[in-house]
Image (cartoon, rainbow, N blue to C red):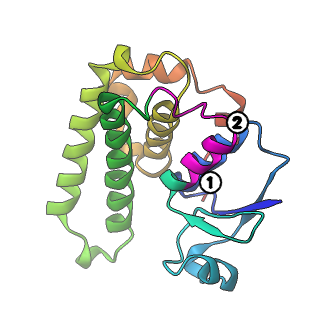
Amino acid sequence: MMKLIYSTASPYARTARIFIQELGLQEEVKEVFQHPFENPEELIAANPLCKVPCLITDEGQAIFDSQVICEYLDSIAGNQLFKDISHDWHQKTLYSLTRGLLDSAVAWQQDKMREPEQRSEFWQERFIKSIDRGLEYFEQRLEELPRDFSAIHVNLITVLDYLDFRHPEYQWQDKFEILKKWWVAYKEKPSIVATQPKA
């Protein structure tokens, strides 16, 4: 059985966990919670960066980086969630934007976790502005997303939920009403409900 090392707070790990459920791989992948800040030996042995998610295959091979893990899982399940993305440069760009939004939201959280005198208003403003622009970009292009539920949907929903989780003061639902209506249509999916972020 494969093993996915994850943490409940990581949005990157959450994307892999959503993939597992959407692809029906629950019986083939065992999810193992580990906190990367505790430097668990198993995680370090598998991933020298000590980051989650990390997938260990049946053969004992470690696969890390959420995109690589998600693509691997999708490949063994018949190419379902990347099928409209893999050979379309525009869809690839939209997918890349979701990853960039995740990066900005996580970097913003990391700066907020610093001691007050070490925080950077300059960088926090840049992270917020990039999120502003990215969400506005998506709000204007939702009709361009794949018709079927896809990796883009997974990442974008994860971004929005992470903003609620770590940055409630941002109040994205008040800023982007069209995007909120889109999100409402998916937020009760079992895979989304079961993987809600937790501290």
Amino acid type of the residue that numbered disc 2 sits on in the rendered structure: Leu
Residue lying farthest to the left in this orientation: 122
Q: Position of residue 195 (x, y in %)?
A: 66, 44
- The quadrant where residue 9 appears: bottom right
- Does residue 195 appear in this view? no
Question: For this rendering, which residue is in front, 187 or 14?
Answer: 14
Image disc number at residue 198: 1
Q: Which quadrant would the N terminus be assigned to in this image?
A: bottom right
Q: Position of residue 158 (x, y in %)?
A: 50, 41
Q: Disc count in the image?
A: 2
Position of 189 relative to 86 (above/below): above
Label 1 to label 2, Cα distance in Å?
Answer: 23 Å
Position of 139 relative to 163 (above/below): above
Amino acid type of the residue that numbered disc 1 sits on in the rendered structure: Lys
- Does residue 192 appear in this view? yes
Which span of residues is magenta-colored?
69-84
Position of 150 relative to 155 (above/below): above
Q: Position of residue 94 (x, y in %)?
A: 33, 33
Q: Label 1, secondary structure: give it.
A: loop
Front position among marks 1 and 2: 2
- The quadrant where residue 188 appears: top right
- The quadrant where residue 53 appears: bottom right
Position of 37 relative to 152 (above/below): below
Image disc number at residue 23: 2
